[in-house]
Image (cartoon, rainbow, N blue to C red):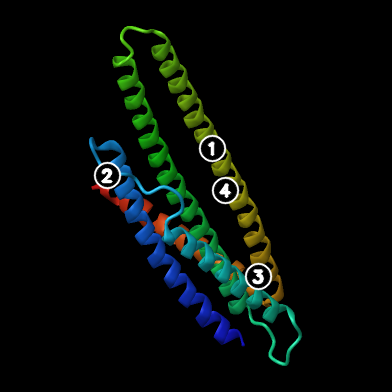
Amino acid sequence: SWDHLRRQARQVENEIELKLASLSKLGATVASRSTGPGGDALPMGKPSQELEIEELLKKLNSVIASMGEVLERPSATPTNPSMTHMLERHKDIMYDYNKEFRRVKTNMKAAQDKASLMDQVQDEIRMYNTANGDGSDYYLSERNRIEGTHRMTDMILEQAYATRQDVSRQGRMLQNVNSRVSGVIGRIPGINNLISRINTRRKRDTLIMAGVISTCIILILLY
């Protein structure tokens, strides 16, 4: 039923929020250890929180799809605009969670790559110091350092492309929301007339206030 799916969506959203907070704390810890000297080994690969969040996001997407199917199938109870608005709200929340999840994962990977690059540079420095004057190790370390810089540049470009895709998707979502609002306004009888009356009364109140203020200014100037 609709109520059951709605409660399930809220429960999954609460679980995702808690897991994201835990993963963000882990990402901050990884970033601080990657910049600190002599830290412990950084966790590589996917933490358990990432796997759990991925499963919860899939579950939330499935629940939202089921809610859409409930609204689309014919039933004795007509669909009201509040149910449609609630479904769109759950979709927006899932989009925000996906965006935050990608941001946290990117920050953690950047911290891990930075720590790995620093370890590599330190190893190359030790190799150069023990090379007994042989310059080949030095050039090899420089080449590896340049390759590491290229990898960091590629990662930054990937983040820029992902950000551009997010902006484009938000623009499409705003267009869809505007079209749905226009459709709802067209379906509700008398809403346009009510909005017109509200605008007329607002203009009238503005003119009255302007007249009162002008009269007060004139009286002050005269006295």
**Outermost residue, bottom direction?**
76
Q: Give the quadrant of residue 85.
A: bottom right
- Of callouts 2 and 1, the N-terminal one: 2
Q: Which amino acid does label 4 sit on?
A: Asp
Q: Which label sits in the foreground, 2 or 1? A: 2
Q: Which residue lies furthest to the right in this view?
A: 74
- On residue 40, the disc is 2
Quadrant the N terminus occupies: bottom right
Q: Cα distance, mark 1 to mark 3?
A: 43 Å
Mark 2: secondary structure: loop
Residue at 65 percent across and 55 percent down: it is: 175
* Alpha-carbon span between mark 4 and mark 3: 34 Å
- Above or below 36: residue 134: above
**Residue 173 in which image quadrant:** bottom right
Q: What residue type is labelled 1?
A: Ala
* Label 4: element kind: helix
Using the rendered image of the protein, determine whether residue 204 is visible from the camera's viewpoint: no
Name the front one of labels 1 and 3: 1
Task: Using the image as rendered, state which of residue 73 and residue 43 is in the foreground.
Answer: 43
Q: Residues within 10 Å of mark 4 (few under 14, many from 20)?
A: some
Q: Are marks 2 and 4 in contact (CB under 8 Å)?
A: no
Residue at 40%, 59% (x, y): give it.
Answer: 209
Query: Looking at the rendered structure, which numbered label has been put on residue 160?
Result: 1
Q: Is residue 141 in view?
A: yes
Q: Residue at x 61, y 56 (%)?
A: 174
Label of residue 166 in the image: 4
Q: How far apart are marks 1 and 4 (CA)?
A: 10 Å
Q: Which of marks 1 and 3 is nearer the N terminus?
A: 1
* N-terminal-most mark, 1 or 4: 1
Q: Are marks 2 and 3 in contact (CB under 8 Å)?
A: no
- The residue at which mark 3 appears reads as 192
